[in-house]
Image: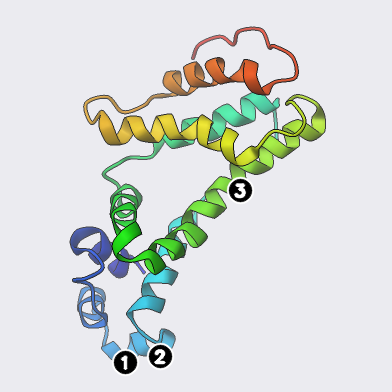
Amino acid sequence: MSATLELLADSGYHALSVESVAARAGVGKATIYRRWAGKKELVAEALASLNADLPPPPVDGTIRERLLVLMVHVCDAEPFSMQGRIMHRMFAYQSSHPELFTEFLRRVLVPRRERLHRVLRDGMASGELRPGLDVELVGLALTSPLLMMQKTHPDRDPVPADAQTLLDLLWPGIATRPAPPQPRR
């Protein structure tokens, strides 16, 4: 898996082959073909492995605190890490390889979104968040500015204080009642 991800991040999908993965991993092609039918299946499973160590959504604390934990996790994502480099490539492939981008969405992004959506649904169920919120839209509002900052401001990666500021801005629109200002970290 790591050899596949490294080659995907370094050279892209076009340059990746079962032969190049076998060489990078130090195994024979037959070893790979015993587990995967080909390049497409190998890459799909490698993409899914990006979430292998993704922690479950937080269950302790207020909904606001739990949302902040997830938002800070977005800030901590290193744009030049394996995941960051692959994410950049996958968005570039949205038009040229829509089936690959769909696998990336299904295996990587959807499970990550679901963590955030679960906390939002918990907040509506507990009465901390307004009922009937569009969890997809609220999730995008909570994370997209942080991701955009990573992509468009390489000299200023988002930090936990940015996540706190963003949550402070959005909280009045999603909460059932305004919360007192939270102390800065």
The residue positioned 20% from the left and 77% from the top of the image is 20
Disc 1 to disc 2, C-alpha distance: 6 Å
Instruction: Say which mark, if any, is on residue 21.
Output: none
Label 1 CA crowd tier, 10 Å (few <14, some 14–19, many 20+): few
Label 2 CA crowd tier, 10 Å (few <14, some 14–19, many 20+): few
Which of the 4 image quarters holds residue 161? top left
For marks 2 and 3 on the same chain, the one whose residue lies earlier in the sequence: 2
Q: Nearer the viewer, residue 131 or 10?
A: 131
For marks 3 and 1 on the same chain, the one whose residue lies earlier in the sequence: 1
Q: Which residue is mark 1?
A: 30
The relative height of residue 29 versus residue 8 in the rendered view (above or below) is below
Q: Nearer the viewer, mark 3 or mark 1?
A: 3
Q: Which residue is mark 2?
A: 34
User: Which element type, helix, strand or loop, lies under badge 3?
Assistant: helix
Which of the 4 image quarters holds residue 158? top left
Label 3 CA crowd tier, 10 Å (few <14, some 14–19, many 20+): some
Q: Which residue is mark 3?
A: 114
